[in-house]
Image (cartoon, grey):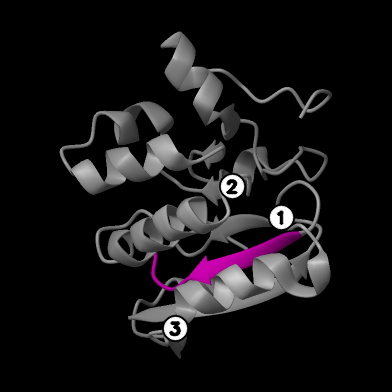
Amino acid sequence: MKYAMIKPNDIVDGIGICVSFWVQGCCHYCDGCHNKETWDRDGGIDLPPSYIEDIIQLLQKNGVKRNLSILGGEPLTEYNVPIVYMLVKMVKKALSDTKIFLWTGFTFEKLLHSKNSYIVSLIQSLDVLIDGKFELENRDITLWLRGSPNQRVIDVQASLKSGETCLLDREIY
């Protein structure tokens, strides 16, 4: 399995200081994507067996609380689901108060109705999901945590509780 990059102190992708994990491989190929180097599933770096432990250590390094951001590539494409599922589950087990953000080209509703139980369980463990494919013709660099207005910043836990898709309120998060 491959990954593209781990950034231990990211203040752009997420809220607060985050450890950002970029998966390798994408099935969407969005025009204007700023991560084209992550599209090829055979590119990137070999994933070490210790990747989960390494990321958990980074989340706590020097006593600084960090959140986890998972980007790509496409974290929820079939071949990336196993590594992302294990990472999310183990981080929540080890550091339950860590907020987890995940970017995907799929929609929240489609993911919740997936026939893949690992995807559904993974989604249920997230705090924030940024969904939808990037649309170059609607690009807006002023948007928070996304590149085009069709993409949504979803409060996953509030959505699961209410049964409706709830957008994250930037003012209170």
Q: Residue at x 53, y 49 (%)?
A: 102
Is 23 one of the magenta-colored residues?
yes
> Mark 2 belongs to which amino acid?
Phe
* Number of the front mark, 2 or 1: 2
Name the secondary structure under disc 1. loop
> Mark 1 belongs to which amino acid?
Asp
The answer to which image quadrant residue 172 occupies is top right
For marks 2 and 1, the one nearer the N-term is: 1
Q: Position of residue 24 (x, y in %)?
A: 43, 73
Q: Which disc, if any, is residue 133? A: none
- Binning the other alpha carbons within 10 Å of mark 3 as few (below 14), some (14 to 19) or many (20 upward) gives few
Q: Which portion, as a residue range, is magenta?
A: 18-26
Confirm whether residue 116 shows in the render: yes
Q: Position of residue 36 (x, y in %)?
A: 53, 71
Q: Which disc, if any, is residue 13? A: 1
Give whichever of 77, 82 is nearer the camera: 82
Decide: marks 2, 1 in contact (CB < 8 A)?
yes
Is 32 one of the magenta-colored residues?
no
Side of 49 where 133 appears, left or right: right
Give the CA distance from mark 3 to mark 1.
23 Å
Q: Which disc, if any, is residue 50? A: 3
Give whichever of 104, 54 is nearer the camera: 54
Side of 155 where 84 appears, left or right: left
Q: Which residue is mark 2?
A: 101
The answer to which image quadrant residue 151 occupies is top right
Q: Is residue 147 above or below residue 66?
A: above
* Number of the front mark, 3 or 1: 3
Looking at the image, the residue that sits furthest to the left is 115
For marks 3 and 1, the one nearer the N-term is: 1
